[in-house]
Amino acid sequence: MKPGQQDHSNKLDLTHCDREQIQFAGAIQPHGALLMLDEPDLRILQASANTESLLGFPPEALHQASIGILLGDEVSETLRARLASQNISGVLAHLMTVRLPGRDDSFHLFANRIDGLLLLEFERIDEEARSHASDLYQDVHASIQALQASQSLQGFFDLTVERIRRLTGFDRVMVYRFDPDGSGEVIAESVGSDRETYLGLHYPAADIPEPARRLFSLSWVRHLPDVDYVPVPLVPELNPLTARPPDLSYSFLRSVSLMYSGYLRNMGVKATLVTTLLKDGHLWGLISCMHHEGPKYLPYESRVAVEFLAHMVSLLMGSKTAEEHDGYRLTLSAARAHHLKAMLGSATSRQGLMDAPPDLLSPLDAGGAALLTEDGLTLFGVTPAERDVRALADWLAAREDPLFVTHRLPADYPPAAAFGEIASGLLAVRLSCDGPDSLMWFRPEWLQSVNWAGDPRKPVEIDADGDVIRLMPRTSFALWKETVPGQSRPWLDCEIEHASELRVGIIESIIVHTERLRRLNSELVESNLELDTFAYAASHDLKEPLRGIHNFVQFLQEEEGGQLSEQSQRRLATILRLTCRMDDLIESLLQYSRVGRIDLDLRPVDLNDVLAQMLESLQLQPPSGSVRVRVLGRLPVTHCDRVRVTEILGNLISNAIKYNERADKLIEVGCDSELDPPVFFVRDNGIGIAPKHFARIFQIFRRLHGREEYGGGTGAGLTITKKAIERHGGHIWLESVPGEGSIFRFTLAPKSRPA
Ligand code: BLA
């Protein structure tokens, strides 16, 4: 492809400008001369076609010659020394000033090493500019002082454009800030009163294509002194070493894309100077200088001054933006301190967050907020519906980054279009690494009116001219108003910071609480064990005197019974009955405390075996009426304590038989093995239990029925069963319909954590 030509082989579309490789322009602007050399010989491989008028040799005469032909031996040696001592890769370095032998004028000499080639650029020294260098210094110094003193961010940018306009003499100087989508806005402008203003105008992303943006970070100042210049080609066109046009990314003379010069002509611009503005190391915007009056060349000394100011503005901007929101930042950090204190002082982090004033919403400028944790979802202010918030949290959980910020939620997450009015903006932090737990703030839609410079949807006009199709930059810059839906006001840095710091605080507080809970738990385990030991010892010691009482009463009855009155005999019988009952109770207590004290003998147990043995022993003592015990499917081999699980199943099955008045009692035992952990069940068609008694049946010695009804018993069986299940890490629960039957379900292991 020839320099300056465009590639028509691909379908022309709006991405064309992003594909144009502007660094291989193959030509330069005429306000300097360029040489490409090899190293270490410093042989000239290519020269710009304008060397004769500037340097005194036509390009053909320089071709393959050593640099000495141009600079003379002495200067060539100095050049070599400079090349050896100065870093010239990844930068266009000002090497030295030179006077060519036999000529009157002097040059600034710039160098850059790229792709194994040496690029040298010559710019004629403007003696007048040089003599005013100290004035420039004063000017820059005063500007920096004024910028440092400026109070507001807008004032800071207003001063920036005013100072740079005064320093450079351009007709128009603007601060142009990029939006996250690549479009941008003129946020400050200094322009003569006789010209229309561009202040507040937005320009679509396509106006500054990606290749141009890439160059912003490579060189800080780019200058186009005359939009109507005639490009100067390189001779020869292709570099003999690389067989392609050289990479001019760092060249200050590089010829610009026809798209750009066409664009500027459409805008009535004759000359430009553009500098980069970075914030925290990222491209933030530009300072764009335009001249409408006619061509305008800015000498090197002034360009350095502008570059220096742009660096200062970039550095100061960060602190000015921070200062701008200082008050708000303080409010947020005070709220955060309250939240953290409340979380640490409450039983759980969640409760602390919910109870403490201020609430999660009010310090932050948002329409609504949501807190989603294992314990539930709480909404504050105006938010999407609960199920929408949950779905959004699930979507966020699938992302890697724990922080998500957008002021265009419907564009990022299409379902949000349904509630865009309430939540076009979302600031969210995740609170767990494996679940949807999160904290979110919602910002309502902000129907913003954007003033585009021309219709942003038509950045280019494609015009068929015979065979040649040309992409034309927009020719209309008429104000084009657009109302942007589905967007909220963007989130400020201090708000994003608030969210992420709150997240860290919450996570820390969760850790503190978990640690506290762990400690309490182990204390509880210890004191439970002590209680069990006490109950065991006490009941053990009670048994003996009780047996004594029983035996003595029995002797009394047998030996002296005949001499006692009928009433006394009845009393003795009652004492005997009561001692038996007390013995049963003590036995239950012993069993109960034993379950808490013993170490479980955990190993794989085939529960089908356990069940078969138990059913066999049931047949030895058949109860009244017919009893069928049906095992549904096979029970899994389970890691558990065989003796305890035999007791558990035995207790549940015997209860099922006991509390059943039907002639045909049906008991079904089974397991939902596909659940995690497997859920066992024992179902009966017995008398059932009213839901209000569900909790009571697990309390020790609490009976629902009269002492002698349903075969009696101490009322400790289910308590012991529950304790044995909990010792395995499982739990037990039931469903029941009085008159129809009950189903007891239980697990024998804790729920496993997701991987
Ligand atoms: C380059 N366009 C640029 C540059 C700017 C702008 C700043 C970089 C100039 C440089 O590096 O020196 C645009 N300048 C602006 C805007 C403002 C301003 C928006 O001051 C607002 C105040 N340009 C178009 C369209 C196309 C296009 C529609 O508008 C293509 C379809 C192309 N612009 C284009 C190209 C370049 C460019 C190709 C790179 C020019 C080059 O360095 O070779």
Image (tube, grey):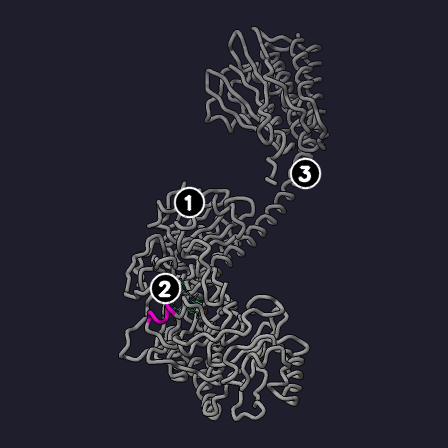
| Crowdedness near tag 2: few (<14), some (14–19) or many (≥20) residues, C-alpha within 10 Å | many
In the image, residue 391 above or below residue 136: above
Disc 2 marks a residue whose amino acid type is: Pro
Residue that mark 2 sits on: 473
Label 2's element? Answer: strand
| Residue situated furthest front in the rendering | 60
Residue 575 x/y as whole percent: 62, 18
Residue that mark 3 sits on: 530
Q: Which quarter of the figure has residue 464?
A: bottom left
Q: Which residues are magenta?
A: 262-267
Q: Earlier in the sequence, mark 2 or mark 1?
A: 1
Q: Which quarter of the figure has residue 360?
A: bottom left
- Mark 2 vs ligand 1: CB below 8 Å: yes
- Would you say residue 674 is visible in this rendering? yes
| Crowdedness near tag 1: few (<14), some (14–19) or many (≥20) residues, C-alpha within 10 Å | many
Q: CA distance from mark 1 to mark 3?
A: 47 Å
Q: Nearer the viewer, residue 708 or 558?
A: 708
Q: Residue at x 42, y 53 (%)?
A: 426
Main SS of residues in magenta: helix
| Crowdedness near tag 3: few (<14), some (14–19) or many (≥20) residues, C-alpha within 10 Å | some
Residue 550 x/y as whole percent: 68, 18
Answer whether residue 287 is magenta in the image. Answer: no
Q: Earlier in the sequence, mark 2 or mark 3?
A: 2
In the image, residue 621 above or below residue 754: above
Contact flag, marks 2 and 1 (Cβ < 8 Å): no
Q: Nearer the viewer, residue 329 or 553?
A: 329
Q: CA distance from mark 2 to mark 1?
A: 44 Å
Disc 3 marks a residue whose amino acid type is: Glu
In the image, residue 44 above or below residue 443: below
Q: CA distance from mark 2 to mark 3?
A: 86 Å
Residue that mark 1 sits on: 389
Q: Nearer the viewer, mark 2 or mark 1?
A: 2
